[in-house]
Image (cartoon, rainbow, N blue to C red):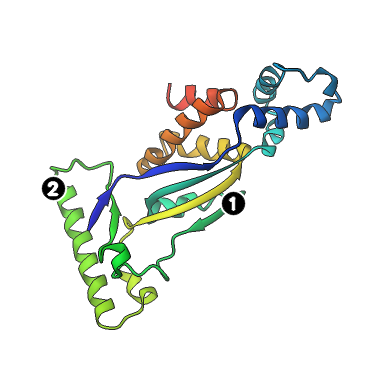
Amino acid sequence: MRIISPSHAILFLPPPDEILKLIETAGRTCYKSEDRIGPDSAEPFIKRIVDSGHESVIEHGVCTVKFVCDRGVSHELVRHRLAAYSQESTRYANYAREKFGREITVIKPCFWAEDSRMYAKWREAMEQAETAYMQLLDQGAKAQEARSVLPNSLKTEVVMTANLREWRHVLKLRCSRPAHPQIRELMLPLLREFKERIPVLFDDLYQTYCG
């Protein structure tokens, strides 16, 4: 059994200057102020857009992110409907096969210290689930049948594509303190990376949730 931490990787995000120019062009179409487009006009224009709440213009920018998280977190993630998802399937992924090392991979819970009794009990439960899963497969069960004993902590991979307005919405909900600690653990690093790549679109959220 492997125990890993959650992570993300941005798979597709156009260069920031291209995104900002596209959003500015779309936004200025509304006001018929295309004549004001210049070498340095995009960023201040978009800042005014964000500050005014006219976020529909931001929808012209799109980003694809791959998440590695546990199944429980993935169930929260896919509830955001204005997005496209592709997720690792436990129906077709047979973890008894050699390409998986004949083991399951689980996500380490961030809320228990490794030397705590609760973490030890969690690890014991994960090992028991792995044993039961492998035994079922060895006895002839199909992967889609044996998966019924797999734990919520099982690692899954989710590729999510959404427009930048939806990403802002997701981050507002999932980076806030009332959010589940494991989805915050996943989303806060993504917010930091968005802020580094496109500050004008994510500075305000970074200051609220990471500042």
In the rendered structure, which amino acid carries the disc numbered 1? Arg
Instruction: Give me the residue at 23% from left, 65% from top.
Output: 130
Mark 1 or mark 2, which has the lower sequence index?
1
Q: Position of residue 117 (x, y in %)?
A: 13, 48
Secondary structure category for the residue under label 1: loop
Query: Of residues 15 and 156, which is closer to you in this image?
Result: 15
Q: Position of residue 16 (x, y in %)?
A: 60, 29
93 relative to 162 in the view: left or right: left
Placement of 65 over or under 46, stated as above or below? below
Q: Position of residue 26 (x, y in %)?
A: 77, 32
Instruction: Give me the residue at 15% from left, 51% from top.
Output: 120
Instruction: Give me the residue at 29% from left, 67% from top.
Output: 98
196 relative to 60 in the view: left or right: left
Q: Is residue 150 visible?
A: no
15 relative to 9 in the view: left or right: right
The Cα–Cα distance between marks 1 and 2, rounded to whole angstroms, is 38 Å
Instruction: Give me the residue at 28% from left, 77% from top.
Output: 137
Instruction: Tell me the quarter of the image containing the C terminus.
Output: top left
Q: Is residue 211 visible?
A: yes
In the rendered structure, which amino acid carries the disc numbered 2? Arg
Image quarter of residue 95:
bottom left
Q: Which numbered marker is on residue 189?
A: none
Placement of 23 over or under 211, stated as above or below? below
Badge 2: residue crowd in 10 Å (few <14, some 14–19, many ≥20): few
Image quarter of residue 204:
top right
Identify the residue position indicated by label 1 in the image.
Answer: 81
Placement of 141 over or under 15, stated as above or below? below
Secondary structure category for the residue under label 2: helix
Identify the residue position indicated by label 2 in the image.
Answer: 117
Badge 1: residue crowd in 10 Å (few <14, some 14–19, many ≥20): few
Instruction: Tell me the quarter of the image containing the N terminus.
Output: bottom left
